[in-house]
Structure formats: structure tokens, C-alpha cells
């Protein structure tokens, strides 16, 4: 067989895999006696057993072989784990390769560190059970399934040397977003982008049901993947050595196929769609775990999904089975007397930044190059007299975005993602300098298509947002443009991303990444012809309860203030820009009235001193608590429903009869009158946890 491992190589990779399996099980079960130096006793077991074993042996196998591949070819690779509930497996691997202890020195590479590693897992104050922000090397949060492959492709765009391996769970593959994500390969340019290697893990089951793809034969799975543009290779079985041997060979083949596709495109130019490799791995769920528990089969069934032995503390037979299971991985050989990974295994992981946990692409802020943004003042929409003419404000924004593309072409780190609406949203000026990415054949009537384009138009909000998130988390910049109503399709992703940003703020080693900008167009009240079907102003309501540090809403009411908010949204944490409808709108401010906005944020700008701001284009802090930074707080300018009247300094709600406040004072430092907002009263209690701030910070 080509690329067959020698026996010593096979021994080594299997031993490494067993060490990772041991650490995975240890995290789920043990709070003491981490190396089984004494017989296992109930007090060594955690009081509450949490975690997902079923997917983990497969993830550990993938990680061990990617390590080998990276070392062999000195390649730069990251791993996106779609079934991110396999958190303990990934944590086990980043500990084995040494990244974990470098970032978290208290979890050292010795017996004390192992004990801590086990105890912290899925424990209050410890680390999450899923792959998550604290997991080194991760750009993907486990939890809400479906976005792994989209994130992987986003990471690969404009990263020509990067290999992104992506495990897709067979359950995850049933989700709409994942099903759509296979098409991403049609937008991957082998000359300028990196590669994505999907590894479809058919372990047979979800939580309690079989998985659809797992029950198909290889032929049907192959047809599906070939139809999407991949050339699949299959590895299947439950014999440990055979599966490892086959997987190593198949991975090598895939790697060489990827490099061949890239070499051809880079040497001879992109000629149509290449056929990219994919891997299909069929192994039993919970492989090498307890075969039966209480007389019922567990390994190779859905029962292995989480904790296969649930009553280890109370049930001596379960305790015995756990000890036998742990000892089957031979911890006495895998770890030395101090509890470090045995020396002959430690060399199997790559070194330095080649380790997947340390790859800088997975901590994108380390690599982010700021965009060169043109000054919005050069794009001023001149208005002779307020409300004397109508303009399409997004059309003016398109000109600014055109110049963002032009000014950053050399650094190739900006893309626009849109579900087929860029023209409809009047942003077509970008096509003066940029193209839509398209690798399939074209016909004479097509417009602005090219394999080199960086405008990503695909009719899937999930893909647009998923690609953008992958692009941002690896340190680049982008904009998601969508009709307001359909931003709700991927609103849950927006929330997940905001949670990621919030958690990342707590970790010094995670460098800040560029903001995720959503431009909402065709806004609710301006749907002239689509009417009721297109009215869904839910994204703002989704974003507003998020913390102000990670979510902001900009509401430029017309063309003139649209310019300043665009660069503001680009620079901040997780901005949300909203413009009025793309259709013609009255323009209000006269030129020169927004002079305070020479820089952003405008110093001392408040509702009364700046007419543009007063027209409704301030930044809205959305927060459940005061913003941490000292901000110049201004009163509301034009919230859609709740208002702080500038005349009376009084908060009022949509209907004071049904909703109402307790005391809420507006401590606006820059409030022109210096007065505070008094509270209004009414019968119903004030809706909880909303301290909404309109701030010029
Ligand atoms: C969108 C979403 N729906 C439901 C769940 C609940 N859930 C967690 S794991 C899981 C099964 C996952 O199966 P699979 O992707 O095959 O992973 P594996 O079998 O490898 O554990 C489900 C349904 C979820 N996490 N996300």
C-alpha cells in the first residue's frame, strides 16, 4: 500500500492516540489519582459526571495523524472540530503537545498538572465541556452544531499556505447550515486560498438516534460528496491498527492531492473547478470504551454519546469497568514517573507554532493587519437644504466600500459576504474594482464574476455569516450585507459569535479580532413593495440585550451620517451597522453640520450639539450593565420605540399603560440641560435587564 506506516511508526501513533484517549476519559471521570498509581476508589471519581466520550476517540485519531502530517511536510494546519462537544479530546491533545501548559502554566506537564486538567473539566470555575474560546487552537465554538465547515472555509480564504482540516459529525451533517456548507468548495480558489479537508466522521449515531448519512453505503455517501465537488476516500473499521494504518495512508493521499491541485492552479492559472479530496471515517461511536454496561451494548451505539458508565461512584461494577477501561490505555507506559508524556511520544507532536494549538491563524488577532480606510469626509453627501432631496444612502456607501477594496487590494484582507443582494442593496459601485467570486463556468450574460473576486455572494445567510466569522477569527476583515428581515436566518450565529467575543475578552492570550459588521438594508419600515413578508426587524432586538462591550448598533437615518458610521462600525468590537432602506430617502443635515465628527468618536458630541448625531446616528451601547469604559453618555436620539425625550428628559416606553419603568435616570454627562431623566411610572414592572445606552464612545 502506498504511504503505509512502518510497524514502529504505527506503534508510536497508536500509543499517542491511547494517551489522548486516556486523558479524555480522565477528564470526564477523575478528580484524583490521575495516573492510577493506586487502585481506583469512589473518592477518586468526580461527584458529577459530564462530557462526551462517543465522538472523542475519532477526534483523537484525527489529531494524532494530523500531527504526523504537519511534521512530515512542515505544513501549517488548524483543526475545526464540528462536533465540538468532544471538548475533552481537543483539550487532551493541546495538553499533550504542550500548548496548554504554556498558556495555562498552572496546568503543568506533570502529575500535578494532570490532576488539575482533570478536575477543571466541566466544573464550575473550570473549563467548558465543549471546544470553546479557552481551548487553544480553536476558532470554533462547540455547542450549536452546523457551522464547522463554513468556519473552516472562511479561515482558508486568502490564506494560501493554510490547511484547515474540519471534522464533520454525521449528526451535524443533518443540519441545514452544514448541508449548505459543502458548496463552499465551489468558492475556493486554489491559487490564492488555502485548502479545507473535510473529514466526515460516520460514527453512526447522534444523541439517541442513528445518523442519516451513517446508514448510507459508501457508494451513496461517495455520490453525495462527489456531487458537491469532492473526491472522497474511505477509511472504516474497528481494528485499531488497521484503522490507523489506513487513515495515515488516506490522509497522505489527500494531502498530496491538495498540493497537486494548488500547484497546478498556481503555476498554470485557475482553470475551472478542481476536485478536492475529502475523507470519510467510519469507526464505532465510543470506540475502545466499555463494550457493554449492565448487560446492554454501549460501544458502537448511541449510548456511548456522553458518559458510558454513569454510576461509577455508587456501583462497584461500574468502578471496576472504568478502571479496566483506563488501564487498557496503559498509562504507566504513556507517561513517565513525573507524569509527563513519555519522551518517545512527545516527539510525535509538531513544535512551536506548527502545533495546531499554537498556530497563529487560530488566534487571528495576532495576524490582523488593520484596513486602510478612506476618510468618510471625502464621501460627504452634499445636501443644500434639509429634506430637499432624496438619495439612496447605500449607493453612497458602495462608493466608500469600493475604495476600501481598492485601498486594501495588496494586503488581500477584506471581503464582502452577501446572500445575492449586493446589487439590490445599491452597493454595486464595488464592482468598479472588485468581482464576485465564481469558479464554475460562466456565460456571456453573467456579470462581474471571476475566480479572483472577493465579493462572496451565495444565497445562504448561514454560509455568508459562517465564512465571515472564519475569516475574522483568523484575523481578516469583512462585512455581511443582508436585508433586515433575513438577518434573522443567522441571528443565532450572531449571538454565538458575540458570546465568543465576550469570553475572549477575559483571556489575555486571545488577541482581539476585527469586528463582525452586519449592514442591514431594506429595513423594516421601508419595504415599499415587499411588504409584510419582508418585515422582520428582529436582529436589532437580538443584539441589543448583548453586552455593550461586544455589540453596538448604529442607526444612520439617511445618507449623510451613513459615512461616519461605516468606519466606526468597522473598528469597534462587534459592530452592527444599520442603514435605512436602499430606496431613495430624504436627506436631512446640511453640509457642515457634522463638523464635530472630524474623528470618531466625536469629542463631546451629543444629541444637541451635533445635528447629525441628533438626527439619530449615534452609537447605541447595548448593555445589561453600565459600560465598563467611561463613556460620554448622551440621551437617546431616536430609538425605535423607547424614548428619552430631550425636552423633558423623561424616559417613556411604547405604551406606558402596558410597560413601564421603575426609576431610571439618565445621567447623561453631556446632556445640555445638565438635568437628569426622571422616571415615568406605570402599572406594569419595567422589563428586566435592559440598561440601554446611547453613547458617543
Ligand atoms: C443545532 C444543535 N441542535 C441540537 C444539538 C444537541 N446535540 C448535541 S450533540 C448532538 C448529536 C451530534 O451528533 P454528531 O454530530 O454525529 O456528533 P457525534 O456523534 O460525533 O458526537 C445533538 C443533537 C446541538 N448541539 N446543536
Image: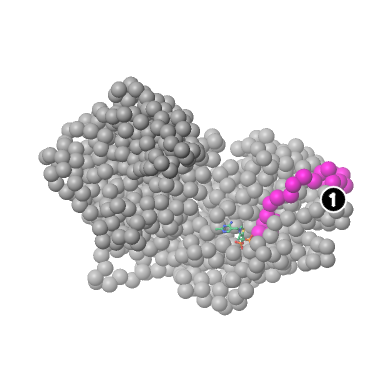
Q: Looking at the rendering, which quadrant does residue 123 occupy? A: top right
Residue 226 image point, x, y percent = 49, 73
Q: Mark 1 = which residue?
A: 314
**Span highlighted in magenta in the image:** 36-56
Q: Is residue 520 above or below residue 181?
A: above
What secondary structure do most residues of the magenta stretch adopt? loop
Q: Looking at the rendering, which quadrant does residue 215 occupy? A: bottom right
- Which residue is at 19% across, 44% downward? 587
Residue 316 image point, x, y percent = 88, 53
Quarter of the figure that contains the C terminus: top left
Q: Is residue 33 left or right of residue 680?
A: right
Q: Residue furthest top?
A: 674
- Which residue is at 35% across, 37% downward? 643
Q: Is residue 587 left or right of residue 183?
A: left
Total count of labels: 1
Helix, strand or loop under label 1: loop
Residue 543 image point, x, y percent = 43, 45
The answer to whether any part of residue 277 appears in the image is: yes
- Which residue is at 43% across, 57% downward? 489
Q: Is residue 188 left or right of residue 582?
A: right
Q: Is residue 349 above or below residue 104?
A: below
Residue 362 image point, x, y percent = 51, 47
Quarter of the figure that contains the N terminus: bottom right
Residue 450 included in the magenta stretch of the image = no
- Residue toward you, 81 or 565: 565
The answer to whether any part of residue 249 appears in the image is: no
Quadrant of the picture in which ligand 1 is shown: bottom right
Amino acid at each position: 500500500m502506498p504511504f503505509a506506516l512502518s510497524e514502529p511508526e504505527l506503534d508510536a501513533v497508536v500509543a499517542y492516540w491511547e494517551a489522548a484517549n486516556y486523558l479524555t476519559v480522565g477528564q470526564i471521570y477523575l478528580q484524583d489519582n490521575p495516573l492510577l498509581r493506586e487502585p481506583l476508589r469512589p473518592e477518586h471519581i468526580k461527584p458529577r459526571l459530564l462530557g462526551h466520550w462517543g465522538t472523542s476517540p475519532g477526534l483523537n485519531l484525527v489529531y494524532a495523524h494530523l500531527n504526523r502530517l504537519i511534521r512530515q511536510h512542515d505544513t501549517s494546519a488548524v483543526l475545526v472540530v464540528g462536533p465540538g462537544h468532544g471538548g475533552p479530546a481537543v483539550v487532551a491533545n493541546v495538553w499533550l503537545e504542550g500548548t496548554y501548559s504554556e498558556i495555562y502554566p498552572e496546568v503543568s506537564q506533570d502529575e500535578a498538572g494532570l490532576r488539575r486538567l482533570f478536575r477543571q473539566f466541566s466544573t464550575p470555575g473550570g473549563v467548558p465541556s465543549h471546544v470553546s474560546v479557552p481551548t487553544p487552537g480553536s476558532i470554533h465554538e462547540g455547542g450549536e452544531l452546523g457551522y464547522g465547515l463554513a468556519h473552516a472555509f472562511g479561515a482558508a480564504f486568502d490564506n494560501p499556505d493554510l490547511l484547515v482540516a474540519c471534522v464533520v459529525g454525521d449528526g451535524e451533517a443533518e443540519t441545514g447550515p452544514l448541508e449548505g456548507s459543502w458548496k463552499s468548495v465551489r468558492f475556493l480558489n486554489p491559487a490564492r486560498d488555502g485548502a479545507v479537508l473535510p473529514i466526515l466522521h460516520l460514527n453512526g449515531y447522534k444523541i439517541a438516534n442513528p445518523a442519516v448519512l451513517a446508514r448510507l453505503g459508501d457508494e451513496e455517501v461517495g455520490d453525495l460528496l462527489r456531487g458537491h465537488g469532492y473526491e472522497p476516500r474511505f477509511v472504516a473499521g474497528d481494528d485499531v491498527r488497521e484503522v490507523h494504518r489506513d487513515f495515515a495512508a488516506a490522509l497522505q493521499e489527500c494531502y498530496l492531492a491538495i498540493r497537486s491541485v494548488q500547484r497546478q492552479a498556481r503555476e498554470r492559472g485557475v482553470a475551472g473547478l478542481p476536485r478536492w479530496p475529502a475523507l470519510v471515517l467510519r469507526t464505532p461511536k465510543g470506540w475502545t470504551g466499555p463494550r457493554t454496561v449492565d448487560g446492554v451494548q454501549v460501544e458502537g451505539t448511541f449510548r456511548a454519546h456522553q458518559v458510558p458508565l454513569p454510576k461509577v461512584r455508587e456501583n462497584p461494577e461500574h468502578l471496576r469497568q472504568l478502571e479496566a477501561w483506563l488501564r487498557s490505555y496503559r498509562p504507566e507506559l504513556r507517561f513517565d514517573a513525573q507524569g509527563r508524556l513519555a519522551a518517545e511520544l512527545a516527539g510525535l507532536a509538531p513544535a512551536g507554532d506548527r502545533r495546531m494549538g499554537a498556530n497563529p491563524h487560530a488566534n487571528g488577532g495576532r495576524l490582523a493587519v488593520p484596513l486602510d480606510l478612506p476618510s468618510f469626509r471625502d464621501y460627504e453627501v452634499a445636501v443644500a437644504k434639509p429634506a430637499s432631496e432624496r438619495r439612496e444612502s447605500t449607493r453612497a456607501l458602495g462608493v466608500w466600500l469600493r475604495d476600501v477594496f481598492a485601498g486594501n487590494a495588496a494586503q488581500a484582507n477584506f471581503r464582502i459576504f452577501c446572500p445575492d443582494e449586493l446589487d439590490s442593496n445599491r452597493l454595486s459601485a464595488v464592482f468598479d474594482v472588485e468581482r464576485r467570486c465564481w469558479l464554475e463556468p460562466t456565460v456571456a450574460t453573467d456579470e462581474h464574476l471571476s475566480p479572483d473576486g472577493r465579493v462572496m455572494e451565495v444565497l445562504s445567510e448561514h454560509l455568508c455569516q459562517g465564512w465571515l466569522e472564519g475569516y475574522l477569527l483568523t484575523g481578516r476583515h469583512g462585512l455581511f450585507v443582508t436585508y433586515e428581515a433575513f438577518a434573522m436566518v443567522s441571528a443565532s450565529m450572531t449571538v454565538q459569535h458575540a458570546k465568543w467575543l465576550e469570553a475572549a475578552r477575559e483571556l489575555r492570550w486571545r488577541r482581539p479580532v476585527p469586528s463582525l459588521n452586519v449592514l442591514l438594508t431594506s429595513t423594516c419600515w421601508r419595504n415599499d413593495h415587499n411588504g409584510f413578508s419582508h418585515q422582520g426587524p428582529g436582529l436589532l432586538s437580538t443584539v441589543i440585550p448583548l453586552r455593550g462591550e461586544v455589540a453596538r448598533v448604529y442607526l444612520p437615518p439617511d445618507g449623510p451620517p451613513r459615512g461616519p458610521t461605516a468606519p466606526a462600525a468597522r473598528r469597534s468590537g462587534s459592530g452592527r451597522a444599520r442603514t435605512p432602506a436602499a430606496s431613495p430617502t430624504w436627506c436631512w443635515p446640511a453640509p457642515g453640520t457634522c463638523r464635530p465628527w472630524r474623528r470618531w468618536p466625536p469629542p463631546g458630541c451629543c444629541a444637541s450639539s451635533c445635528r447629525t448625531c441628533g438626527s439619530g446616528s449615534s452609537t447605541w451601547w447595548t448593555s445589561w450593565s453600565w459600560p465598563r469604559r467611561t463613556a460620554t453618555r448622551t440621551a437617546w436620539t431616536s430609538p425605535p420605540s423607547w424614548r428619552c425625550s430631550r425636552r423633558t428628559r423623561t424616559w417613556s416606553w411604547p405604551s406606558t399603560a402596558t410597560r413601564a419603568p421603575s426609576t431610571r435616570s439618565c445621567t447623561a454627562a453631556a446632556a445640555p440641560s445638565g438635568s437628569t431623566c426622571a422616571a415615568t411610572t406605570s402599572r406594569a414592572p419595567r422589563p428586566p435587564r435592559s440598561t440601554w445606552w446611547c453613547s458617543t464612545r
